[in-house]
Image: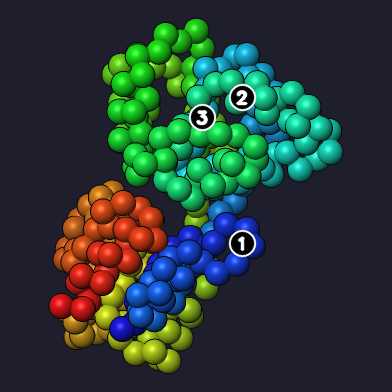
Amino acid sequence: MKVLLLKEPKSGDQGPDLYVEELSSHGLQATLIPVLSFKFVSLEQLFDKLSHPEKYEGLIFTSPRAVEAVALSLQTSANKEAWEHSLKNKWNSKPVYVVGKATAFLVEDIGLSSEGEASGNAEKLADHICSKNMSYSGPLLFPCGALKREVLPKRLKETDVPLETITVYQTAQHPDIRPSLTHYFTQEGLPASVVFFSPSGVKFCLGIIQELSADKLHQIKFAAIGPTTADAMVAEGLPVSCTAQNPSPQGLAEGIRRVVQH
């Protein structure tokens, strides 16, 4: 059974993609095609904010890319030394909130401990933050992408949790989407399932997939990594065969196995 994963490029060089590995362990032949490319911005301003932990009550990361921006801002020797010498410990005395395991893993890489990874999406993470009933003398710092959804900021605002956002990356369509998808459909034929990992992925890929699969589109089981992506698929009139119970390789593998093997 062939499964096509339409997701962002893998972070760093940490060996095979975890989603490909997990699906393969279930006997599914998974192929990953990157659909997004990222440009990091405002890294100096980001480090300037990270240099003043006393102004903030904590950090929020809702994507691996935002953590990568922090790692990139620490690349100069002076910044790295300041981080290792004192800043890291000061931030570790405050809550660092994350969505999902991939983000938590990268946060650990820069020396911080995190909480909230089981929340799985920004809405549930916002609920987790609000449930702590902390008193705030300063805002939570939220490095994010230009396409961030307003769910988390809106929810925090409603419960008077102060937030300061800084845009640290921009998302664009991967330049090789069309040739990559064309090559896949030509060589591998129609996949049993196609998995979308973001609303942007739906926007950038759906038209090409409809074109390449022509009158066989209905034979493909379409899956979503989470409810936000599923909503974007439904908005485009695409039937969603499964949504991962949680946004992890295991959660996705369980859902895919159910829909393609029955």
Q: What residue type is labelled 3?
A: Val
Q: Name the residue under label 1.
A: 14
What percent of the width, then of the height, locates residue 50?
65, 26
Q: Which residue is painted at 31% across and 72% down in the image?
A: 194
Neighbourhood count class around disc 1 (C-alpha, 10 Å): few under 14, some 14–19, many 20 upward: few
Of mark 2 and mark 3, the one earlier in the sequence is 2
Q: Which residue is painted at 45% across and 21% down in the image?
A: 163
Disc 2 secondary structure class: helix
Q: Which residue is painted at 70% across and 39% down in the image?
A: 73
| Image mark for residue 242 | none
Q: What residue type is labelled 1?
A: Gln
Q: Which amino acid does label 2 sit on?
A: Trp
| Image mark for residue 91 | 2
Q: Mark 3 points at which residue?
A: 96
Neighbourhood count class around disc 3 (C-alpha, 10 Å): few under 14, some 14–19, many 20 upward: many
**Depth check: 229 or 100 in front?**
100
Of mark 1 and mark 3, the one earlier in the sequence is 1
Q: In the picture, which quadrant includes the C terminus? A: bottom left
What percent of the width, then of the height, locates residue 113?
56, 34
